[in-house]
């Protein structure tokens, strides 16, 4: 089972930027579609975006499209989430996850098997 560890969270003012990283253990990182999810206070976990195994294809939630960018470095077993123009509503714990099977990017959390512990992002004046 792959293990994931997120980092890069913190507090930032509206309009600011953060870059989250997620490092995976094991040698099979390239075989996984990767996803980013978030869970805000009192909210359900929601899909933020995902990236294909090769990194060629990405998909984003409408709420972050144009502001967030996902990338991956398979040589470093790492997936990134660059977050720009942050808004207070982006405040959440952010999780990376590996999709359990298949090449497509899924938006349902149920399709993802391994999860990191999460990293907190707070956007506040």
Image: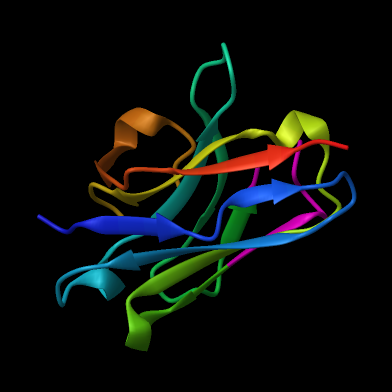
Q: Residue furthest left?
A: 1
Q: Which residues are magenta?
A: 60-70
Residue 116 magenta-drawn?
Answer: no
Q: Tell me the quarter of the image containing the N terminus.
A: bottom left
Residue 103 visible in the snapshot:
no
Task: Work out whether 44 lies above or below 59.
Answer: above
Q: Residue furthest bottom?
A: 75
How is the protein colored in the picture?
Answer: rainbow
Left or right relative to 70: residue 26: left
Q: Tell me the quarter of the image containing the C terminus.
A: top right
Q: Quadrant of residue 29?
A: bottom left
Measured from the top left, where is residue 33 in percent x and y? 37, 59
Residue 120 visible in the snapshot:
yes
Left or right relative to 89: residue 81: left
Q: Nearer the viewer, residue 12 or 63?
A: 12
Measured from the top left, where is residue 57 in percent x and y? 56, 66
Left or right relative to 19: residue 79: left
Question: What residue is at 76 percent from the left and 29 percent from the top?
Answer: 89
Measured from the top left, where is residue 121 in percent x and y? 62, 43
Question: What residue is at 41 percent from the left and 43 percent from the top?
Answer: 118
């Amino acid at each position: 089972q792959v293990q994931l560890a997120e980092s890069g969270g913190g507090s930032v003012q509206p309009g600011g930027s953060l870059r989250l990283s997620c490092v995976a253990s094991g040698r099979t990182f390239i075989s996984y579609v990767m996803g980013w999810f978030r869970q805000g206070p009192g909210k359900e976990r929601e899909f933020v975006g995902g990236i294909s195994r090769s990194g060629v294809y990405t998909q984003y939630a409408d709420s972050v499209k144009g502001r967030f960018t996902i990338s991956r470095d398979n040589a470093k077993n790492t997936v990134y989430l660059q977050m720009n123009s942050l808004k207070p509503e982006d405040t959440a714990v952010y999780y990376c996850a590996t999709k359990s099977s298949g090449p497509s990017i899924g938006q349902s959390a149920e399709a993802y098997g391994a999860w990191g512990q999460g990293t907190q992002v707070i956007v506040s004046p």
